[in-house]
Amino acid sequence: MKNLNYVIREAAEQDLEQIMELENACFGNDAWDADTMHFEVVAHHTHYLAAFEGPDATPKLIGFAGLSKIPGNDQADIQTIAVSEAARGKGVGKALMLELLKEARRLHTAEMFLEVRADNPAAQNLYLNLGFEHIDTRKRYYQPDDVDAWVMRLQFAKTSIGREPVVLGIETSCDETGVGIVRGNTLLANIISSSMDEHARFGGVVPEIAARAHLEALKPTLDQALAKANLSLKDIDAIAVTNGPGLGGALMVGIGAAKALSVAIEKPIYAVNHLVGHVGVDILERGELQTPTVALLVSGGHTSLLLVRDLLNDVELLGETIDDAAGEAFDKVARVLRLKYPGGPEIDKAAVGGDPKAIRFPRGLSLPKDMEKHRYDFSFSGLKTAVARWVEVAETKDEPINVADIAASFREAVADVLVTKAVNACLDHKVPRLLLGGGVVANARLRELAQERCDAHGIELRIPALSLCTDNGAMIAALGAQLMMAGRAPSSLHFGSDSTLPVTTVQSH
Ligand code: KG4
Ligand code: ZN
């Protein structure tokens, strides 16, 4: 899939020859004639896209798709979609559909329809995953094959409740109890209660303590969020809740509360992915998420590099940590240096005035051989051990330990690896954007280095406000609202927590 390099652009008259070739190859007897195709491709009420593969000089058409929407009517139709046989199963059809959905949204479409052969489950599944539902069957629609057509519909829900939905988000995947409220793309409240202090004497998050703290904090946090938004529970249109990844017991507290609320106020519930929430939060600051984007998520619980082509439909995990999370490395090294928990801010403080080049600590998974197999993966346990060894050796030799130099050199090693791999991901995938998320984003050197390297490569760097970078309920509410506005059916009440929920599962049912 990754080897297929293609571009999608608007179809034009000069593409007609290749379009007709592909039309005939795909639809045989049922193919449109060249005049009909010409009319539809250039018509004002249609929007046709073409996908091309190969060198710029001689691009080869591998797919096309078209949408029609009569002005003044809020319904749209997918008129056609075709992908060459050689390019099937490689995401081209989905990419074309996603672009058409964007266009439909831009045109303020309320409902979108399409027909698909009853004997084509691969296409049906693609449309079901995009939020379409099967609403009717036209008997023996495709002739001469005598095959039925499924009529499918996607409702853009913004209009199904007649306005932007008010969504309450609950986040309890780690040690922050977060309750956020949004209206559509607008942030109304973001209240966080953290159990961090209770974990301090253990030097890291203790799952049992976190779960109990959520139980105690949930109700007051919820009350505060409603008060901040100046709303009551009856104003809420839907509940969104993190169901993974995260600590199992901690997640279950939020899920239980969210299900109870959903039943009590008789409103739909959306179970959403924590990591995708970190990405979607940008919508609350900019009104939209610009895609494609690479996202680097770094916290005490995760270190993930994502390629996001579409927030709700196409999030790919490029790499992640194979041992400690970046924040965890800060916390552990702080212990070695006898600094307080959480270690990140303490190391940031200690590093001021230190020489980042004093000690060359190892950059995990960055040797040429690692860059083949683990190009986008991270490893911090070797770095932590290197710092511990360095301190140990100095102590046995009775040499003075320069905490500022060690902190600055350690911080440099972490920031260097994170930024190098994130920028590589942007360059490799020709993505001109990088979004940061997670608590480690507070790190002064990480922010500085990311800005420097992004500027050098013409990459736009996005760092949301810190209150939206650390774990919070607003990002979960925002993702729930996006799902609702895209017409997604709510989750059932049957979903559970999933500690290792993959990023590809944006919503659990
Ligand atoms: O996103 P977050 O609040 O949630 C959890 O993972 O729970 O991230 C907390 C992590 C901790 O490991 C903390 O040490 C780290 O983020 N952190 C930092 C800084 N501030 C917080 N790491 C490096 N530099 C900082 N300034
Ligand atoms: Zn997080």
Image (cartoon, rainbow, N blue to C red):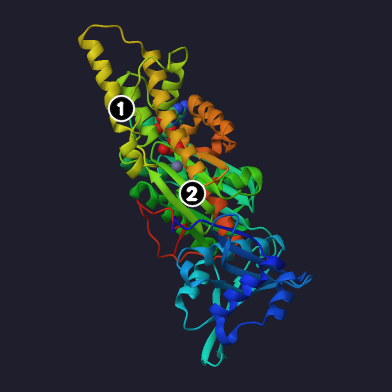
Q: Quadrant of residue 433?
A: top right
Q: Nearer the viewer, residue 2 or 502?
A: 2
- Give how far apart the Cα atoms at labels 2 and 1 are: 28 Å
Relative to the observer, which residue lies in front, 35 or 192? Answer: 35
- The image shows residue 97 at horizontal and vertical percentages of 58, 66
Q: Tell me the mark number nearer the camera, choosing from 2 and 1.
A: 2
> Which three-letter amino acid code belongs to the residue tagged 1?
Lys
Query: Residue at label 1?
Result: 384
Can you say whether 441 is above or below 226 in the image? above
Q: Which residue corresponds to the image point at 35% horizontal and 51% vertical from the top-left?
A: 500
- What residue is rendered at 33% in x and 18% in y? 337
Q: Amino acid at mark 2?
A: Leu
Q: Residue furthest front?
A: 57
Q: Report ligand 1 position as a quadrant.
A: top left
Q: Residue 9's quadrant in the figure?
A: bottom right
Q: Is residue 500 visible?
A: yes
Placement of the N terminus among the 4 image quadrants? bottom left
Q: Residue at x 45, y 21 (%)?
A: 348
**Secondary structure under badge 2?**
strand
Q: Which residue is mark 2?
A: 307
Lateral position of residue 462 relative to residue 219, left or right? right
Position of 218 compared to 21: left or right?
left
On the image, the x and y values in percent for residue 467 come to 55, 36
Residue 355, percent from left and from top: 43, 14
In the rendering, at what x and y percent does residue 268 appear?
53, 63
- Image quadrant holding the C terminus, namely bottom left
| Residue 14 versus residue 138 in the image, above or below | above
